[in-house]
Image (cartoon, rainbow, N blue to C red):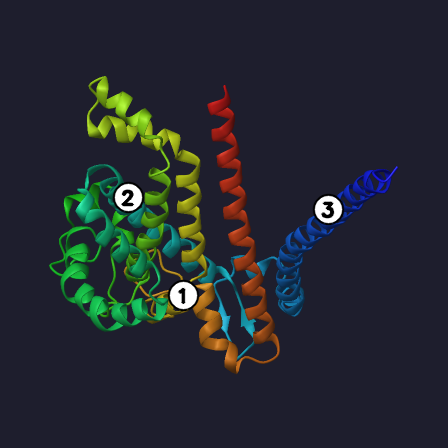
Amino acid sequence: MSSQPGAIVAPLAADQRSRRDARHDRQFRWLLKICALLVLASLVGAAGATLWGGRSAFASFGWHFLVSSTWDPGNDVYGALVPVYGTIVTSFLAVMLAVPISFGIALYLSEVAPRWLRTPVSSAIELLAGIPSIIYGMWGLFIFAPFFSAHIKPWLTNYLGDSPDDGKLSWVAQHVPFIGKLFGSSYPFGASILTAGIVLAIMITPFISSVMREVFQTVPTRLKESAYALGSSTWEVSWDIVVPYTRSAVIGGILLGLGRALGETMAVTFVLGNAMQLSPSLLDPGSSIASTIANQFSEAVGLQKSTLMALAFLLFVITFIVLLIARLMLRQLARKEGT
């Protein structure tokens, strides 16, 4: 009879413990859900705030705002074409230049470099990835832009442009469409769309290469050793084993770098030239959405301020479209891998 109270208390304690655990699990799930919804609410709030702030510009200019290159604060006439064009071109130039270099760095560190060299080089890359963008901008303005203007730009203008110093078009400019316009310029300084693209590429290369290196290291060692055992070379292992295994993650890292390039402000502002003119030449100055907002927002009032808010909303839309395309690409890759 003396053992019955203990036998009754034990199931009661276990039942109370299970109820408490279930209550804690529900609270934990709700906490995680609130965190996820908070991110979504912040995203929608940022888009809604910029759209609401730019309502006057959209109402005044309509769809013409997207295709107009006019920027006249004196008459309150504005168009978004020049900054949108500069944002897209500089970002894609940066990605085109940075991805091959980042790919080579990541493959070297993960597959080729000796073990004693991997750690210091990887640490240096991560350090470069954390440098503030204004440092890259100042380096671009005071060092790279003068060097580009004195040594690189004359060569591009003379051998690829449609306005060489001697007046004689090169064979490339004569026979390759649009090359002459892309590299023809009479602007005497180094700040240009191409300069901004190169500085952006240097800025995002450590970031992309660091992501790629971490991804390449997730490839199982057995897969690579099996390929080597079958007689594959280092290039074949890298291209046929490492890259297909990590394709989705690599694309994700590239698009993260593109997203950083799209929203970059200070590095672009220093070296882009900040000229509200639409030119097909990569050697002419231009403007981007972020640099336009940074340069003019402190003094903007009325319709000009609304226009800058509208530009911020357009930057949000461009970034969203890029990420949407990335998701579709990754889904298509996953579907092909599944088949």
For badge 2, the amino acid type reads Ala
Q: CA distance from mark 2 to mark 1?
A: 32 Å
Nearest to N terminus: mark 1 or mark 3:
3
Q: Quadrant of residue 158?
A: bottom left
Q: Which residue is mark 2?
A: 106
> Looking at the image, can residue 137 be seen?
yes
On screen, residue 171 versus residue 336, left or right, reads left
**Mark 1 element type:** loop
Are discs 2 and 1 less than 8 Å apart at CB?
A: no
Q: Which mark is residue 21?
A: 3
Q: Which residue is mark 1?
A: 287
Q: Return the x and y of residue 75 as percentages of the image width and height.
A: 55, 77
- Camera-side mark, 3 or 2: 3
On screen, residue 107 versus residue 2, left or right, reads left
Camera-side residue of 229 and 38? 229
**Mark 2 element type:** helix
For badge 1, the amino acid type reads Ser
From this viewpoint, which residue is outermost toward the bottom? 299
From this viewpoint, which residue is outermost toward the front? 2
> Looking at the image, can residue 281 be seen?
no
**Mark 3 element type:** helix
- Camera-side mark, 2 or 1: 2
Q: Quadrant of residue 177?
A: top left
Nearest to N terminus: mark 2 or mark 1:
2
Q: CA distance from mark 1 to mark 3?
A: 57 Å
Q: Return the x and y of residue 270 as percentages of the image width and height.
A: 33, 71
Q: Residue visible at 52% across and 59% down? A: 315
Camera-side residue of 84 and 322? 322
Q: Could you classify mark 1 by the number of other residues whose Cα lies within 10 Å: few (under 14), some (14-19), or many (20 or more)?
A: many
- Camera-side mark, 1 or 3: 3
